Image (cartoon, coloured by chain):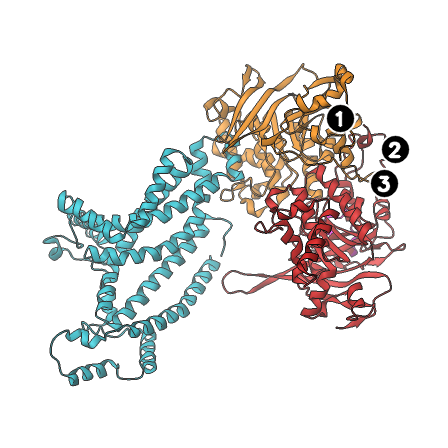
Chain colours: A cyan, B red, C orange
Amino acid sequence: MSGLLRYAFQRLLLTIPMIFILLTVIFLIIRVMPGDPISMVYGARPVSEELKAEKRAEYGFDKPILVQYGVYISGVFRGDFGNSIRTSTPVLQELFLRFPATIELALFGLLVAAILGFTTGVLAATRADRPVDHGIRVFHIASFAIPVFWLGLMFQVIFAVKLKWLPVAGRLGGEMAFTFRPVTGLYVLDAILRLDGHALLDVLQHLALPALTLGIATTGLLGRMSRASMLETLDQDYVTTARAKGLGERVVVLRHALRNALIPIVTVFGLEFAVLMGGAVLTETVFSWPGIASYLIRSINARDYIAVQGSVVFIALFISVINLIVDLLYSLIDPRVRY
Amino acid sequence: MIRVAGEEGALLEVTGLTKHFPVRQKGFRRLRGLVRAVDGIDLRIQERETLGLVGESGCGKTTAGRAVLRLVEPTAGRILFRSRRMAADGVAEARAVDVLSASRREMKMLRRDMQIIFQDPYSSLNPRMTVGSIVGEPLIVHRMGRALERADRVREVLAAVGLTPEHMRRYPHEFSGGQRQRIGIARALVLEPQLIVCDEPVSALDVSIQAQVLNLLEDLQREFGLTYLFIAHNLSVVKHISNRVAVMYLGRIVELASTERLFAEPKHPYTEALVSAVPVPEPDYMVERMILQGDVPSPVTPPSGCHFHPRCRYAVEVCRSEAPVYRDVGHDHFVACHRGDELSLQPIRDGDRSGGGGTAS
Amino acid sequence: MTSADVLLEVRDLEVHFAVPGVTVRAVDGVTYAIDSERTLGVVGESGCGKTVTALAIMGLIPSPPGRIVGGQILYHRDGGIVDLAQLPPRGQEMRAIRGNEIAMIFQEPMTSLNPVLTIGFQIMESITLHQRMTKREAKRQAVEMLRAVGIPLPEERVDEFPHQMSGGMRQRAMIAMALSCNPVLLIADEPTTALDVTIQAQVLELMNNLRRDFHAAIQFITHDLGVVAGMADDVAVMYLGRIVEAATVRDIFHSPKHPYTQGLMKSIPSLTRSKERLVPIEGIVPDPSDAPPGCGFEPRCPERMSICRTTPPPLVATAPGHDAACWLYQPDVHLVRRTLRGWK
């Protein structure tokens, strides 16, 4: 166990240089983009150049870029991500406010992708080259060929506008938005903690379409990986051994093949999460989901350097923590892996 | 180039050859230990001789073969090679070249003289190259001859290994395992080397094909004056093809002698056990099987003293504490065993008069 | 071979594999029998059909692409004779025999055990599947089996994972698993080929001891004539999907009849005899999808006649208990014998 902790600690240490490099790259890229944040703030309003210059000086944009960089980085190491140019609020505060929404969406999206991906993948592998397999493979390809925003819009049109089964957007409906008091910011968890069934239903209804959209969009890769991994596992000697014992095919697949087939997929799972975050940016935009990704989009449009930098660090940290968890999960599935 | 006076006659002289691989831990690459794959071996191979190197998996025989060619960089030791060609070119005197201190350029020249044949005839040939280009590539690398001359040379070598010129335009996948091994041999042969390291050249082949390749290797040796370092785990094959045999255990040579002596008068208990464990294709062949207990220990943490002592039925106190000296016990018979002189071990029984088996027809 | 106590009879078995474009006759009319408590060695080179025959008995032919297209596999059990070739491979009846009355061990001990399950679990799984036992009883039985196959400290090793064991130990564990239900027939497919020679000697000795204790018949598949000589009572030699010769182990080694068997014996280097030049079998094994129409060995045979090219020879007795499939041993054919010596 101490080995496990040491490994986790080492991995976390390694994320520090990673974040540092990422910050540097983002810092430079965003400053190369045309347009500047101060002009964006005032838009078309007639503002004197003096006022703009004053504002620029306030954020230090008049200083050489290296100085700006030094100031920002030293701030980050003190836990100060600076103030948003667009809203003047501390970036960190904004991020903490929005982060739970993104986590919730991402986790439920991943859940949908995992369930759909595994089941269809395994089903296709056990029925290889039969009609079921062909159908599932078409679905997998379609799932990553269809653009996320289009899928989201279709879901909105069908399930919200036409059938009126589910809400169009947002995290809470009607008066609930005023009465519900969050605890952690993960609304599903909060509704359970508050023992509020009414709220839970409302939260889940709002979560359904975004999670489904994000999930389905990432099912394809996972599904194809599951199918390939399962096919390979079913071809292993120990599966033949299991059959030679006289075990039924269901037991052979579920007990002997599945866990082994999972091992390579779990690795993809971590990487998949990065893809999923990309999808979350679009999903949050389509469904007006008040998460970190939609915040990032708005900040980019406003050339809000400070907010963009903060968001990217948050998302990167989130992805690397998820990857670390996945790596640790590894040792639970595969007894050969010990840290 | 450092020129060292090698002993007269020996084509290859290996002293104290050592290869240790580091074992690293996950995460921050901390050194955890060393795999002592080859742990100080001495060998001398005469011109036109076949020296067999046997041992079980993990004993270091393959690493030893590659270290001799510097395909893996040895950790320590000295390798002297008497290059006929470099002597003729005036690069080296008719004396031995120190392989381990050779420069890149000198090493490239040495490569023409020292070649290797691999075990797996499937993965050792590039599937996207024709047989002609596989066999001819070494000529291009060493800038030997014009295109037409090279093609002639390839045809010549293919004929020597029993393939035809039509095979040049075909791809490896069109050939059977035995034929692919012939292609691998042709590739090794094309530069007219003096020494060929044969790393398990027949163990991936079917029984009926093995004999074809073994006969071919013998014929080529006679025809081109080749010297072989023949690495294998199959004792019958090694006995058949070798003039002398070295037995390896956990990175060290435990016994080395002429083939006749090694099988008729084994001096090391491991050799005795190894020989007695070989299944003999004669139903009435009776021999006391010296069944070794347990597994080969890990080369990361080898046993103290004599590496073999935990499995040795003759082990005494000194075997646990002191590593035996590898020494000549007469008739060029080398053994690393404290009791090498006193033990009288079971030889292979002569099957010539047992009336059985394979010669019947 | 006596027919008094026949355990398993394979008759004219044909197994085909449908690869796009061609049909591979992996097993092309195989007939043999195994008597109770005897060991039959099945010898042949890669692709001769020896493993496919074994998988057919177990009902484990991968389908698609494989299919038993003809013949019978008659299993003589207490209640009568069952044709295993007719049973649905995944059906109740076959599964009650497979792993219970007929068990199998495989070539690669490194890959034949499930890496994510403990050794003990994998043995107990067999036991609880076929026998009425509680988990605790099954575990005790698993420990006993590990002890029987010579694994030291079985109480501890039972909870270990395969990767914590060496190749030899894993193969012992496989044997323990196969014998855990007291099978009447054990099929061993090259069980020692992947092992080092000293470990092979351990495992062969173990199997020799166990077959006496467990009273099981063994079908021992191997390409190693040395292993067969030491293990088998009877031997069947396979070539290109057919049995070319079958006899007791002494008859096979002392007076091999089929030119292929003779060729094999002359082509292996001997450990016990002084060196002589090997006599290889010329040519290569034909691709089973492109097998010769007559005798499969005809293109490589030093004794071949014109009839060999057109008509496959039947497996007939050349002496009591010694069968060979070769036209040389059909008296009438000698009249038209015209060897084609001088080939190559």
Q: Quadrant of the N terminus of chain B?
A: bottom right
Find residue B288 and name its label. Answer: none
**How far across and down, in percent of the image, does residue C244 sit?**
69, 25
Eyeballing the image, is B95 above or below B358? below
Whether the residues at callouts 1 and 3 have beta carbons within 8 Å, the answer is: no
Please report the residue visible at 67 percent of the width from the left and 15 percent of the height from the top.
C3
Eyeballing the image, is A191 above or below C104? below
Dot 2 corresponds to which residue? Answer: B353
Dot 3 corresponds to which residue? Answer: C274
Q: Quadrant of residue A292?
A: bottom left
The answer to which of A236 and C23 lies nearer the viewer is C23
Discs 2 and 1 share one subunit: no
Q: Which mark's residue is nearer the viewer, 2 or 3?
A: 3
Q: Residue flagged by tag 2: what amino acid is it?
A: Arg
Q: Residue flagged by tag 1: what amino acid is it?
A: Ile
Eyeballing the image, is C259 above or below B15? above
Dot 1 corresponds to which residue? Answer: C252
Q: How many marks?
A: 3
User: Considering the numbered disc 1 on the image, is that residue within a helix, a strand or a loop?
Assistant: helix
Q: Quadrant of the C terminus of chain B?
A: top right
The answer to which of A190 and B89 lies nearer the viewer is B89
Q: Is residue C26 magenta?
A: no
- The outermost residue toward the right is B331
**How far across and down, in percent of the image, does residue C279 sit?**
79, 37
CA gap between label 2 and label 3 equals 11 Å
